[in-house]
Image (cartoon, helix red, strand yellow):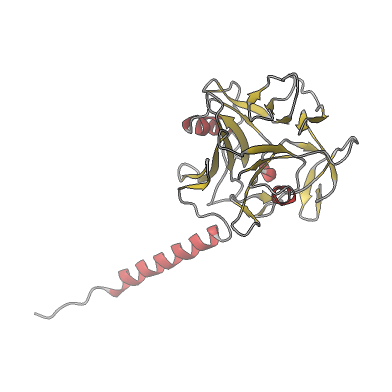
């Protein structure tokens, strides 16, 4: 009896499918973090985790956890550039990290003026004057009082010189302060009224119950087949799953950016920011939160 050769068409079809899948994976991930879970130590007292959801929509979250009791860890909110009605000169998060010799940086509060009508018609550019939306302080200088919302003051995180953190409980002497969009987690539970169904890139900051650990979270979005983004409700639950007890959202959308200092001293962007619908493009923003790690 003659040996039969395996049919060639199914094998060729399988090879072609593998090639197509490989090419698609390369196209989707090129220049962006691979959509696979990662957990590693960046510095003493600092870990990085990449959380990936594949269903029902792709989502990639980047989480840095900082032990504030680690010797030498310090925090910095962007200092004022002037005493005018627009006290900050816009800069990308990677530029902020580089300018101040930081090891970690994340985008901060929303700001004005701002518009984005296309790659050639947007504001601000790097260096353009802007103002944060909420109360802001840096190294003891509370240089911006912020604008009130119809429902009251914007949420604010206060950071003391000794790394004591508190949300919405203004101390007698303010050292560092950065405001956000809304509270996400209160006493270990999702905050009320997180009903916005939109999937967007988002940035958030949270604390564990005793305030020792700080969580910086950036979720990529607006990138089909890579990361669609996340709702406020799902972001709150994601943070609760990590051990967060209290959290607020910072500016999101094209502003969402998380950066660390690389081994060569140059900024390394951990996520895939998207400004003007261009993946990998950083948006110049008003203020930021930075971390010095020895």
Left or right, 242 with respect to 100, comes to left
**Towards the viewer: 79 or 112:** 79
Left/right of residue 14 with respect to residue 37 in the rendered view: left
Instruction: Residue 151: give x, y in percent of width and height.
Output: 73, 19
Q: Is residue 169 above or below residue 36?
A: above
Residue at left offset 64%, top offset 57%:
265
Whole-percent x, y for residue 45 in the image: 52, 40
Residue 75 in the image: state x and y as whole percent: 67, 37
Q: Quadrant of residue 199?
A: top right
Number of dots carrying numbers = 0
Between 36 and 80, the residue placed more toward the observer is 80
Quarter placement of the N terminus? bottom left
Residue 243 located left or right of residue 131: left
Q: Is residue 231 above or below residue 51?
A: above
Residue lying farthest to the right in this orientation: 84
**Residue positioned 31% across, 70% down in the render:** 11
Give the residue at the far left of this rendering.
1
Q: Nearer the viewer, residue 54 or 46?
A: 46
| Residue in front for this viewpoint, 181 or 3 | 181
The residue located at (88%, 39%) in the rendering is 82
33 left or right, relative to 167: left
Give the quadrant of residue 231: top right
Where does residue 294 sit, x and y in percent of width and height? 60, 45
Q: Residue furthest bottom?
A: 2
């Amino acid at each position: 009896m003659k040996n039969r050769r395996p049919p060639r068409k199914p094998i060729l079809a399988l090879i072609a499918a593998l090639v197509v899948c490989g090419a698609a994976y390369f196209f989707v991930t090129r220049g962006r973090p691979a959509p696979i879970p990662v957990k590693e130590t960046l510095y003493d007292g600092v870990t990085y985790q990449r959380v990936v959801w594949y269903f029902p929509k792709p989502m990639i979250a980047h989480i840095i956890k900082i032990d504030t009791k680690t010797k030498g860890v310090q925090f910095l909110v962007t200092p004022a550039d002037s005493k005018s009605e627009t006290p900050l000169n816009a800069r990308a998060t990677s530029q902020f990290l580089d300018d101040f010799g930081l090891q970690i940086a994340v985008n901060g509060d929303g700001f004005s003026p701002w518009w984005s009508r296309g790659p050639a018609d947007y504001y601000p550019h790097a260096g353009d004057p802007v103002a944060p939306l909420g109360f802001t302080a840096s190294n003891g200088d509370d240089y911006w009082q912020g604008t009130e919302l119809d429902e009251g003051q914007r949420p604010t995180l206060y950071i003391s010189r000794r790394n004591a953190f508190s949300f919405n409980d203004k101390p007698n002497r303010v050292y560092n302060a950065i405001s956000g969009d809304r509270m996400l987690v209160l006493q270990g539970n999702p905050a009320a009224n997180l009903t916005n169904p939109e999937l967007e890139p988002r940035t958030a900051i949270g604390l564990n119950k005793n305030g020792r650990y700080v969580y910086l979270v950036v979720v990529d979005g607006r990138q089909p087949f890579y990361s669609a983004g996340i709702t406020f409700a799902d972001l709150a639950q994601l943070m609760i799953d990590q051990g967060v007890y209290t959290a607020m959202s910072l500016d999101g959308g094209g502003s969402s950016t998380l950066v660390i200092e690389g081994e060569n001293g140059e900024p390394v962007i951990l996520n895939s920011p998207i400004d003007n619908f261009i993946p990998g493009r950083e948006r110049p923003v008003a203020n930021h939160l930075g971390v010095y790690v020895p």
